[in-house]
Image (cartoon, rainbow, N blue to C red):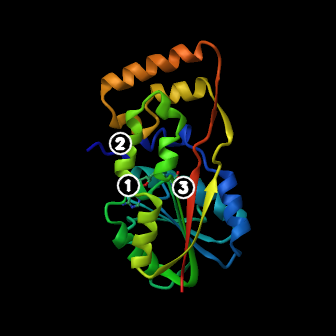
Amino acid sequence: MFKVNYNEISQVYDEVRHADRDLIDHFWRELDLNPASKILDIGCGTGSHADLLQKVTQGQVYGVEPAAGMLNQARQKNSRVVFELGDAAHLPFEADFFDFVYMTDVIHHVPDISRMFAEIYRVLKTNGQVGIVTQSHHQIERRPIVQFFPGTAAADKARYPDIDQIIAQAEAQRLRFLKTTSLYENQAIELGSEFLELVKKKGYSMLHLIADKEYDVGLKRLVDKLRDGPIASKAAGETLVWFEKL
Ligand SMILES: C[S@@+](CC[C@H](N)C(=O)[O-])C[C@H]1O[C@@H](n2cnc3c(N)ncnc32)[C@H](O)[C@@H]1O
């Protein structure tokens, strides 16, 4: 199966993916975070979210990331955030340490989700909360990219755990499910030149999961359609799944 090489893409990652300011504001509104809060970003990548969250909360933010290339970029971004090499199933932190643990767009890369939730439980303080940002299978099917590259939906559903699986795995590790929050679903968006450029660069990792022939056909269809101008579309949205440690 194709695996994204994050050491390779660390050089261009920040050009194609930006921190989601609305998500950070959402965390800020939902949680009682303050300068004494200890916060962990699992699979922090180049540290864009950890950086923003540290600036917004002034809290003690930590990031853990297995790809050294991504980590190097993160360390250059914000020296107040502690960035550590590690992965979701082996968190290099002591028990009962964090008030809030979150991950954005990472869970589909984690080979052992059950072990990951056991680790999250271990490092969380009692009453600490967890936020997992991902896409449900329903949202994957409704991604605008699927109308041009239909095979990407099945390929991504095979690697993304659906929401009920995430909840079951977390509950099996004693985390209490709180709620799901849907983010950005059906927001009006336009697919234009930036989208086309990203498709051409295969900046969307699911484009690596389909056959070359399907990619070529989809790209041609997209280029043809864009001749009439930007395409009005709707965001598939993301799902934020909340848990707490009792
Ligand atoms: C799509 S990127 C998301 C990065 C960052 N969270 C963001 O929102 O920009 C996925 C990240 O997950 C990391 N990753 C892959 N496998 C992982 C694992 N088993 N545990 C923790 N992180 C992992 C990758 O190295 C990569 O940085």
Query: What residue is shown with label 1?
Result: 109
Query: What residue is shown with label 3?
Result: 47
Say the numbered circle drawn on residue 155.
2
Q: Tag 2 or tag 1, which sits nearer the N-term?
A: 1
In the rendered view, tell whether residue 141 sits above or below residue 60: above
Q: Is mark 3 within 8 Å of ligand 1?
A: no
Residue drawn 38% across the image and 20% down it: 216
**Which of the two discs, 1 and 3, sits closer to the camera?**
1
Q: Residues within 10 Å of mark 3 (few under 14, many from 20)?
A: many
x, y percent for residue 79? 58, 61
- SS at mark 1 in the image: helix
Q: Are marks 1 and 3 in contact (CB under 8 Å)?
A: no
Q: Quadrant of ligand 1?
A: bottom left
Q: Residues within 10 Å of mark 1 (few under 14, many from 20)?
A: some
Q: Hey, which quadrant is residue 35 in on the image?
A: bottom right
- Can residue 137 be seen at all in this image of the molecule? yes
Give the CA distance from mark 1 to mark 3: 17 Å
